[in-house]
Image (cartoon, grey):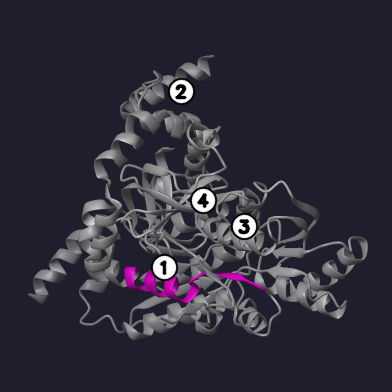
């Protein structure tokens, strides 16, 4: 039986023949490449993927590309050179990453993308995509509801070079702009950063004291904004974030930030490793390459259940 | 010009499957042609009467039946009335038909809705969106013949979802009276995603009549 299975594996993918002939998969390597772990979201991805890979008996190589496509390309070379059986990748750009993923494919190393998608299909085996747009719409709907569908508000954008900054902003506006009494008075980038979120909020507040809400492209900027608002004695201003970090959970529970949107970082990284394992051992790819992972609205009602980008039942 | 001919020859020789230089109208090629100028409103308008309404008509069950079956046997309900993307973590979306009485209305909000009693106990069983702002993408998500993998990325997929809501607004909801709805009869065919525990199903209509 075992022999038959090996033969089938060989038949499925000649490039895997070498590994299929080995007695066990224990020494096989999975490379896990993400943006910088400074953001707890990407750290949760790496930790989730690593835990699942080890559970399935793989060695892991955990690397960060710091959102630099050139560095990502070098890391892919490293993974190929080290003989990785699969690459789990949160990529450094929807266009720039296509060549890197193709390079791995041509070298016989399948890629399993998480969080961000690339603008090409048939290159990666799977793309498990965080539905940033759907998440942004959820966050915006709650923001509008909390604002009573009217008032002056501020938007803090993420780093403009990052596709997700644009996707989230577009999702926000597709909802908010349907409410003519919602008036945007300032829209600035705080580059995903908490310290910039604080300083930008301080400046905006001086120029526009008459605001009722702030919607931020991620949680770290929302944390900066709420700190600046509280320092100015403006506890009435509604703040909504995005990511579902433990910091924002604690702020919600303390009556600070009102809502955020949780992306299932940990779960989707684990799912990617499971699919990689399936592909390595049986040659079977998931039924569909692109798989959307919906986000979940977090408010005071369910914040207690949130821990490290996962909701308990 | 010679370069263009060379390109044509190459395409004919190398990729007959693409149909050479002649434009053949298939859905795929229309989509590819539109890729330069993605026009989701047109994509929806093009399939609404021919595919969307007939599909929902055929697929929908009476809301009471759909709702009862989702509670007792979710996979049977999904098989019969439901749809979701093959992978990912989206909830099931169900096609259903509503025939009931409006027992509550919220028309001050832009995301206006009516609450409908379908079983005669005067209590709300389902919340029907009446726009102009419609939450979610239930109509898109109920259709078996549209698929995220056929779109360039999540932005275009989301815009496509929103275009269904835009279409319904223009075709049905804008004409709806906004006053004195409570007590009136309502019939609708449409879709709703599996609601969270203890919440009313959020139904988006594709056809709707209110009166009587």
Q: Name the quadrant of the N terminus of chain A.
A: bottom left
* Structural crowding at the residue carrying mark 4, measured as other residues with C-alpha within 10 Å and reported as few (<14), some (14–19) or many (≥20): many
| Residue A232: percent from left, percent from top | 88, 76
Q: Nearer the viewer, mark 4 or mark 1?
A: 4
**3 and 1 marks in contact (CB < 8 Å):** no
Q: Is residue B161 above or below residue B53?
A: below
Discs 3 and 4 carry the same chain letter: no
Q: Nearer the viewer, mark 3 or mark 2?
A: 3
* Structural crowding at the residue carrying mark 2, measured as other residues with C-alpha within 10 Å and reported as few (<14), some (14–19) or many (≥20): some
What segment carries the magenta color? A258-275
- Please name whichever residue, A143 or B13, is drawn nearer the observer in this view of the structure: A143
Q: Nearer the viewer, mark 3 or mark 1?
A: 1
Output the chain of dot 2.
B
Give yes or no for residue B19 being in the magenta stretch.
Answer: no
Output the chain of dot 4.
B
What main secondary structure does the magenta stretch of the protein show? helix
**Which residue lies under the disc numbered 4?**
B113
Task: Indicate the quadrant where residue A2 lies.
Answer: bottom left
- Please name whichever residue, A133 or A1, is drawn nearer the observer in this view of the structure: A133
Discs 3 and 2 carry the same chain letter: no
| Residue B121: percent from left, percent from top | 34, 60
Tell me the residue at 71%/79% (across/down): A256
Disc number placed over residue A168 in the picture, else none: 3
**2 and 1 marks in contact (CB < 8 Å):** no
**Which residue lies under the disc numbered 1?**
B196
CA separation in Å, label 3 and label 1: 24 Å
**3 and 4 marks in contact (CB < 8 Å):** no
Task: Indicate the quadrant where residue A236 lies.
Answer: bottom right
**Which residue lies under the disc numbered 2?**
B7
């Amino acid at each position: 039986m075992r022999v038959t299975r090996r033969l089938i594996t060989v038949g499925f993918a000649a490039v895997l023949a070498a590994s299929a002939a080995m007695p066990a998969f224990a020494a096989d390597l999975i490379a896990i490449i993400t943006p910088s772990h400074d953001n707890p979201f990407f750290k949760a991805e790496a930790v989730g993927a690593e835990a699942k890979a080890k559970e399935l008996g793989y060695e892991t190589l955990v690397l960060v590309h710091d959102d630099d496509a050139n560095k990502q390309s070098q890391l892919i070379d490293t993974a190929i050179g080290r003989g990785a059986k699969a690459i789990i990748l949160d990529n450094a750009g929807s266009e720039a990453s296509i060549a890197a993923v193709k390079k791995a494919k041509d070298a016989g190393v399948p890629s399993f993308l998480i969080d961000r998608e690339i603008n090409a299909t048939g290159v990666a085996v799977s793309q498990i995509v965080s539905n940033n747009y759907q998440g942004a719409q959820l966050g915006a709907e709650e923001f509008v509801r909390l604002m009573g569908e009217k008032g002056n508000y501020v938007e803090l954008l993420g780093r403009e070079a990052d596709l997700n900054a644009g996707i989230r902003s577009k999702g926000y506006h597709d909802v908010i702009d349907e409410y003519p009494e919602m008036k945007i008075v300032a829209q600035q980038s705080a580059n995903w950063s908490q310290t910039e979120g604080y300083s930008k909020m301080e400046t905006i507040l001086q120029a526009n004291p008459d605001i009722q809400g702030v919607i931020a492209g991620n949680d770290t900027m929302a944390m900066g904004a709420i700190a600046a608002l509280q320092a100015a004695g403006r506890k009435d201003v509604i703040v909504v974030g995005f990511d579902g970090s433990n910091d924002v959970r604690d702020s919600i529970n303390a009556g600070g930030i009102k809502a955020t949107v949780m992306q299932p970082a940990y779960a989707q990284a684990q799912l990617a490793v499971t699919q990689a394992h399936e592909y390595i051992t049986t040659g079977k790819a998931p039924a569909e390459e692109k798989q959307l992972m919906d986000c979940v609205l977090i408010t005071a009602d369910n914040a207690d259940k949130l821990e490290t980008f996962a909701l308990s039942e | 010009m010679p370069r263009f001919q060379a390109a044509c020859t190459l395409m004919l020789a190398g990729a007959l499957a693409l149909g050479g230089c002649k434009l053949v109208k298939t859905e795929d090629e229309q989509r590819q042609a539109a890729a330069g100028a993605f026009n989701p409103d047109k994509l929806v308008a093009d399939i609404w009467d021919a595919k969307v309404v007939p599909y929902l008509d055929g697929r929908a069950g009476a809301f009471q039946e759909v709702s009862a079956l989702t509670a007792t046997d979710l996979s049977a309900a999904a098989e019969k009335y439901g749809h979701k993307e093959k992978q990912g973590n989206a909830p099931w979306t169900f096609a259903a038909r509503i025939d009931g009485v409006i027992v509550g209305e919220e028309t001050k909000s832009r995301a206006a809705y009516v609450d409908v009693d379908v079983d005669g106990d005067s209590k709300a069983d389902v919340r029907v969106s009446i726009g102009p702002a419609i939450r979610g993408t239930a109509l898109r998500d109920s259709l078996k013949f549209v698929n995220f993998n056929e779109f360039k990325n999540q932005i275009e997929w989301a815009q496509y979802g929103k275009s269904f809501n835009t279409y319904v607004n223009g075709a049905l909801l804008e004409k709806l009276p906004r006053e004195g709805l409570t007590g009136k009869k309502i019939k609708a065919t449409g879709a709703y995603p599996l609601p969270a525990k203890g919440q009313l199903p959020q139904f988006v209509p594709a056809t709707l009549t209110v009166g009587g």
